[in-house]
Image: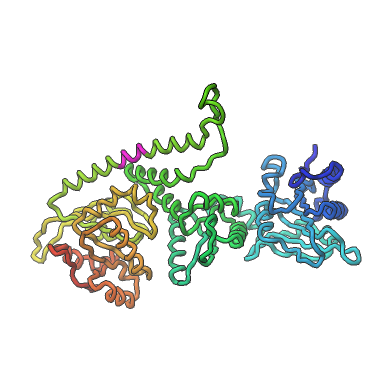
Amino acid sequence: MSQGVLAGRTAGLRPAEKRRLERLCHRRHPADATADLLTLQRLAAESHGLELPLSLVVDGRGLCRLLWVGDLEQSGRLIERLPGSDRRQGNDLRLITCRRGSRSAPLLPGPQESVVALDLGPCLWLRYVDAAGAGGHWPALLLTPGAGDSPWHEQAEGDLADLCVQDPASLVVEPAAAEAGSRATKGPERVLLLCLVGGDPQHTRREEAELEGLVRSAGAVPVGIVEQKRRSGESHLTIWGEGKLQEAALEARRLQADLVVTDRELTPVQARNLERLLDLPVSDRSELILDIFAQRAASGAGRLQVELAQLRYRLPRLTGRGLSLSRQGGGIGTRGPGETQLEKDRRAISRRVERLQRDVKRLGEHRARLRQARTGLRRLALVGYTNAGKSSLLNGLTRVAAADAVLAENKLFATLDPTTRRLTLIDAEGSADQPLLITDTVGFIRALPAQLMEAFRSTIEEALDADGLLLVVDLADPAWPEQLRTVRSILEGLGSLAPQLVIGNQIDRCPASELERARALEPSMMFVSATADLGLQNLREHLRHWPDEAGNSSEAAVPTS
C-alpha cells in the first residue's frame, strides 16, 4: 500500500513527469537521519525542470506522506492533506522544501510559508535550492520550531549532504518540544488581539487594556497584540493591510492562538476575509461582549435579552455552502434551484427573533407595572462604566447580609439583571425617614453594541425612569474621566433627563493627586470606598435630601477615616 500522495499543481504535468514524482513519493528515507540525499537531488532535478518549488512531508518512520507541487502558500493546511487518520499522522513529521531561485538568495521562508509550516507542526524543516553550487555543494538550511520571538530557529546552515545525515531526534530543541506538548493539553482559549492604534499612546494603551479585560472576562487568555496605525487609505475589505495580516497570522501560530479578536466591529465581509487570510476564527469586539453577556445571564429575562441580541448580530453574518434541497416538481416556478439551506436558516432565525421581541416587549410591560407599584417612593439608579463598583456600592449602602448581597466581582459585566434594594435612612435624632429604592443596573462600555442596547432596553429603562442617577466612577482607573464622558453620552442618547450625582469610588486605592484632579473636574463629586466603608455614611446623609426639587447636587465632600 503506497503511503505518499501527490498534490498541488499537478493538472498540467506530463504523464512521465507525474510518474517520476510518484516514484519519489514512494522512496523511503532513513529514520535516524534527516533525509535521503539521492532522493533530494532527484527532487531538485524535477523542481528545476518544472520551474516549480517541491515540498516533501516525511513521517518518523521515513515514509513520504505527501509531495506538494507548487508554492506552500497555496497549499492551505498541509496536515489536512495527509492520507490516513489523525492517529497515523504522528508528531514527528519532517518538512523538506526544494525552492527555485539563485544560490546566493537567502533560504529563510517568507511569512506565509512560515504560517503553513507552523500549521503542519514538523519537528524540522529542511530548505535547499534546486541546483548545486561550485564544487558540487548544495546550499541548505535546517530549521526547527522556535521557542522565543522567532517562529523558526536556524539550527544549521551548510552543505545539503552534511545536513541530511543529522539525527532528527538530536535537532529538536527542548523549549520547542515543550511547547508542542503544551498544545495537546486543552486549556483556556488563547486569543491574539488585532488592534488599530492612533497617535495618542496613552489612549491606545487604555483601549488595549480594556480589550484584554473583556477577553479575560470571557474566560480566555490574551497571549499577544498586533498593532497597526490608522491610515486614511485603509482597505474596506479587511481594514488591516496584507503585510500586517501576514505578521498576525505568523504571530498567532508562534503564540499558539486559537482565536483572533479585533478591537472594532467588523462587517460580515470583513470577518470572512480576515478568517480566510489568517486561517483562524475571528471575532470582533461586539461578538466578544455578546459572549460575555451570554455567560453572565443568570435569570430567564437576562437569557431572553441576550439571545435576542445574539440572533440579531448573527442574522446578517450567516454564510451558506451553495445550493441544497432543490425542489422536485414541474411547472413554472418549481424548476431549477430551490430554497437554499441559508435561506431556511435565515427564515428560522427571523421567526425566533420575532418571538423573542414579543417576549421582551412583555418583559418591559411587566417591569413598567412593577415601577408603577413603587410610586410614592424615591427611586435612585446606580449607573456607570462596567466594573466601576456599582454592585459593591449597593451592598455597602444597604448593609445587606452576605447571603442577600448582589454579586460583586472584579470582572467586566459581572451582573446583568437589575437589582432593587430598599434603603432606610436614619437622621441625627435616630428617627427613620421615608425609605428610598436604589437599583443596580447593567454597566456601560465604550461602543456598546447596538443589538445589546436594543435588547436590554427594558433593563436600561430602570435607570431612565429613576428620580436621580448616581454615576459611579472608579478613581483607581486613570481613564475614569473618559469613562464618565462615555456614560453621560449614552444616557444623553437614551434621552435621560434625571438629575445626576457623580460618586468617586475606590478612594482607598487611588493616589492623592487623583482626588485633586477629581475635585477640579467634578466639583460636586462625592468620594467613597464601597469595600472599605469610607464615606458611605456621608453619602447616606446626602441622599436624605437628594435630589431636591431643583435637581441640584451638593458640593464634594471627603470623608474622614
Q: Is residue 479 magenta?
A: no
Q: Farthest top residue?
A: 330
What's drawn in magenta, residue-wise? 354-360
**In the image, 427: left or right of 493?**
left
Q: Nearer the viewer, residue 398 or 556?
A: 556
Q: Residue at x 26, y 44 (%)?
A: 364
Q: Residue at x 19, y 48 (%)?
A: 371
The N terminus, quarter of image: top right
Which x, y percent locates residue 77? Answer: 66, 49
Residue 344 sits above or below residue 319 on the image: above
Q: Is residue 209 visible?
A: yes
Closest to the observer: 51 or 116? Answer: 51
Residue 319 is situated, as x and y percent measured from the top left of the image, at 52, 42
What is the count of numbered marks?
A: 0
Pick the front one: 291 or 506? 291
Q: Residue at x 77, y 65 (%)?
A: 156
Q: What is the x, y in percent for residue 413? A: 37, 55
